[in-house]
Image: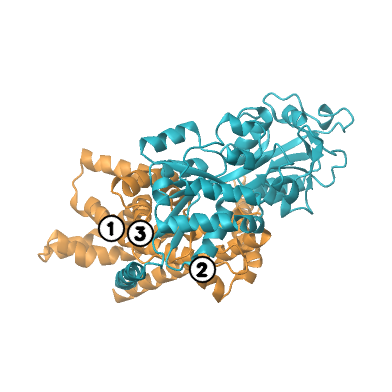
Chain colours: A cyan, B orange
Amino acid sequence: MRKILLASLLIPALALGGAGCSGKKDAGESGTQLGGTVHIDGSSTVFPITEAVGEEFQMLHRGVRVTVGISGTGGGFKKFCSGETDINDASRPIKEKEALLAAEHGIGFIEIPVAFDGISVVVNPANDWVDHLTVAELHQIWMPDSPVKTWRDVRPAWPDREIKLYGPDVDSGTFDYFTETINGESQVSRPDYTASADDNVLVTGVAGDRDALGYFGYAYYAENTDRLKVVPIDGGGGPVTASHTTINNGTYAPLSRPLFLYVSTKGGERPEVREFVKFYLQNAATLAAEVGYVGLPARAYELGWQRFESGKTGSIFNTDKARSGLSIVELLSL
Amino acid sequence: MTAGEWRGVPNLARRHWQSLWLRRLFQALTWLGVMLLAILLFRIARQGAVWLDWDFLTSFPSRFPARAGIKSALAGTLWLIGLTALISVPVGVAAAVYLEEFSRAGRLKTFIEVNIANLAGVPSIVYGILGLAIFVRGIGLGRSVLAGALTMSLLILPVIIIAAREAIKAVPQSLRQGAMALGATRWLTVRHHVLPGALPGIMTGVILALSRAIGETAPLIMIGALSYVAFVPEGPMDGFTALPIQIFNWTARPQQEFHGLAAGGIIVLLAVLLLMNAAAVAVRHRFQRRR
């Protein structure tokens, strides 16, 4: 058996020798044919968009290999900042610490937002009392040592039934963003809720519990509209329901978060990476919608490409400016 | 005859009753395990069967469930398991032979034995971290299928060594004595008598170990195995993905169709596992007959 195994391994290995050489020669001679590999890692939230772009891109450029990992935003940044990948998918802006690590390794990065994810707050369809929630009420419910035990604790008119909470676990970028927006500090939340890394578990949980309240990415609500009821959120300007339109035009605030690509300047010099980024920004709006996210306004993609072309490094989304209520286009124009 | 009549054995009726009751309990527990497996298989089959067709095996992953397939994951898994077997079987069996046939009892041997036994219980993610530090970054193999196979080999080596040692121990001492009495060296004895005799047992251990490796996800994600790959690895230095990663990825998607695809992937994984088992049984059978 071992001989057969060995033979079956050698044959593809030999085939590689031939194929690999001829592939490189073609690229060198014609000059127009793109080759090489685009190495991408990072957030599993952004993964479906990047996968879709990679799929389409490789149909156009057969010689280019696009590989995408899902080490998570933080795990991906570790690789990205030590120069192991060309692009990092990120569901949150880069952190100071990570930017420092990149600088240490001489890696410059260009920050490009590619889509929105609207964090949806949902309840069971049988819940007929919740018409909307304000950000202050959400804070009341989710803050550490929250006094809220029953629905009546949120608003006196609501029933005296225990409120059952569902949310992503602490490793999730959705958790980071939600806690930062609602509780004012990332990773700070009441701990007594049903936490899962798998959003499908949260969907099932809320769908089967009349007293449940949960939050997760918009795509998981959009796929389960018949089993869940989405709660309009009042961020100060009246209740707004999460939908493609309200997330795209920025009215579903403050629970819309941008998703990013971080492109290394060194990788960006290679023609295949450059082409890939260009293709990504041209098609992200359509492809993001296809996999359940919301595209950015067209102007944001133009500004993103300009950023890349002019080699503008550094982050604007991890600064205070990003929290000052400016729209994504305004932020990119800074 | 009732229990009261037989004075030498008190409470005989109660003992019989106890025995019968326990037998039923054990039977029920055995069936519980079988039933759980059956329910699991049934659910997976019902969910995944509709997605299983030739295209599923020969297509790359896609955002369209109807177009998505497991070509790269299946190829990656075959590469990974093939390389892992090539690395771990010779090393594992050699270590077992050394420990059983050549090494002398002593502190060093005890030390090695304790270590191997402990390694068998280390969580797989720890091997992933080790693989990332040593193979991916240390020797600079990158996120290649070879780095994955080396990590997997570390993971299953203890299992192979322990199983192979048990198998070698089970070879009757008289065989060794006979061979040596006729002038065979220790190596010749091992080569011609001990190893062939132990082979069925070794094969069982190897298959169990490889079956564990084929289903592992955590160490692969740790060393940075990819999730989206639209090519088949052509050499040991290529990037790769594997079936468990692809399955994990699909189950996390919001769309129901991808959950069906994941079930389809599980069926394929089970089929690969069964084929491996069948191959091992066939080899074992052949060797047993020849002897």
Q: Earlier in the sequence, mark 1 or mark 3?
A: 3
Q: Is B243 situated above or below A261?
A: below
Chain under callout 1: B
Q: Which mark is residue A59?
A: 2
Q: Mark 2 or mark 3, which is nearer to you?
A: 2
Q: Which mark is residue B53?
A: none
Q: CA distance from mark 1 to mark 3?
A: 14 Å
Q: Are marks 2 and 1 in contact (CB under 8 Å)?
A: no
Q: Which mark is residue B93?
A: 1
For residue B10, side relative to residue A262 (left or right): right
Viewport quadrant of the C terminus of chain B: bottom left
Residue drawn at the location 35% of the way across and 59% of the way down:
B84
Residue drawn at the location 49% of the way across and 61% of the way down:
B243
Answer yes or no: is residue A226 visible: yes
Query: How many neighbours does mark 3 have within 10 angstroms: few (below 14), some (14-19), or many (20 or more)?
Result: many
Residue A261 % position (x, y): 52, 47
Viewport quadrant of the N terminus of chain B: bottom right
Which residue type carries mark 1? Val
Q: Which mark is residue B84?
A: 3
Place residue A3 in its image quadrant.
bottom left
Do discs 2 and 1 share a chain? no
